[in-house]
Image: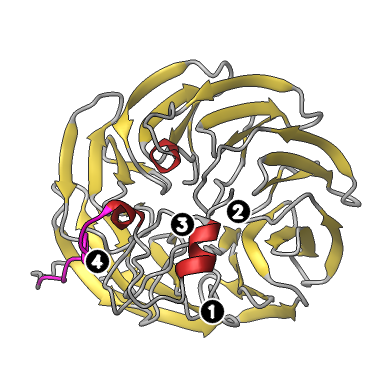
Amino acid sequence: MKLLPIQFLRKQALIVRVLTLLFVLSSLSACGSFSWNPVNWFGGDDEVNPPVELQAIQAEISLQTEWSVNIGNGQGSNYTEITPAIDGDLIFAASEDGDIAAIATDSGDILWRKRLRTVITGGVGAGGGLVMVGTEQAEIVVLDQATGDELWRKAVSSEVLSPPQTNGDVVVAQTVDGKLLALDIQDGNQRWIYETNLPALTLRGTSRPVITSTGAVIAGFSNGTLVAVSASDGIWRWEERVAVPEGQYDIDRVIDVDGDLLLDGNRVLASSYQGNLMAFDIASGRIVWGMEASSYHGLDRGFGNIYYCNDRSHIVAVRDNSNDVVWQNENLAYRAITAPTAINNYVAVADFEGYLHLLSQIDGRIVGRSRIDSDGVRSNLLVKDGWLYVYGNSGRLTALSLR
């Protein structure tokens, strides 16, 4: 049984990313006293793990808005995480209700804007002259980067929640029913498909597949595995576990690899919920480093550190290739923060109230803060040429410079 998304309930002050059972939602969601936090199904207070209140900081860096534009209804109400994509001098953004736009990264000028008659749940992918999104109606839609004209759309096996990717030969995408597939870039005809078995419960989300320079597609799955197949024909290359399910109850055995994978030279790094943080050799799948950690976010690196956000919204800096924690910041606990993004000397994250926070890469202190979107921020932050690009839940895309 698939878990539906848990959204933030302001009245209960709960930020929970783990998803609840469908039959529980259908029977109990109308009850005012029902807690959406799975921890509370087995007893406890309704106010378990409320988001911490923000404390005043001594700002050492300021954020200057360079431009902002609105894109449809933004993330919508389906708990999507539609992250824009930068390719060259353009940033491509999409909204849940079908708006897609190409925007100049330096000026915010809109090159083109299109409206698809569909609900977008996976995106945005950009590369090879294409813009790619996945839909709630189980389709991959491909547009021309220069004009926004639709080139083709193809039905797939189920809903797509992560951005499709391309290497100029195929478009690869991951579906929520545990499949990784490749479509021919010219006409969208299926080239190959790779299938995995889904566990009883999963988080709502899939990691974005990556295509390596060695011609492999690497993808993480809800059963806690990382798989590499040939991009051209789907032939299996290797498979390794990021996490092993443990515990008596299905909810204890959720080990999804949902965060974006990080390519770093000849390594690929992955994290899993209730599992581990691992680095694998791209060619062989050999484990080259790992440590216990629980995260459903992507990773970033800088200053010789690996940065991740755990399931309690603590930002952690770990010395690369070791288990040494350089610093850990707990000041944003349970604030449903985004994946960490390194920029200049800082690590940036945003939270459910729409605040953007800058932390020092040296010691993890919060040294800058600005509210970007009162509806909150779920999508990952982007960086180009020293600017941050933040896509708020309301649909406002903002470019910021550091001063």
Q: Quadrant of the C terminus?
A: bottom left
Residue found 53% across the figure and 29% down from its top = 225
State the residue position of label 2. 162
Q: Three-letter amino acid code at disc 1?
A: Gly
Do the numbered discs 1 and 3 sit on residues whose CB atoms are within 8 Å? no
State the residue position of label 4. 46
Residue found 10% across the figure and 69% down from its top = 57
Q: Is residue 132 visible?
A: yes
Q: Position of residue 212 (x, y in %)?
A: 62, 33
**Mark 1 → mark 4, Cα distance in angstroms:** 44 Å
Q: Three-letter amino acid code at disc 3?
A: Thr
Q: Which mark is residue 20?
A: 3
State the residue position of label 1. 108
Around disc 4, counting alpha carbons within 10 Å, would you say few (fewer than 14), some (14 to 19), or many (20 or more)?
some
**The magenta segment:** 43-55
Q: Position of residue 75 (x, y in %)?
A: 53, 73
Quick one: SS at disc 1? Answer: loop
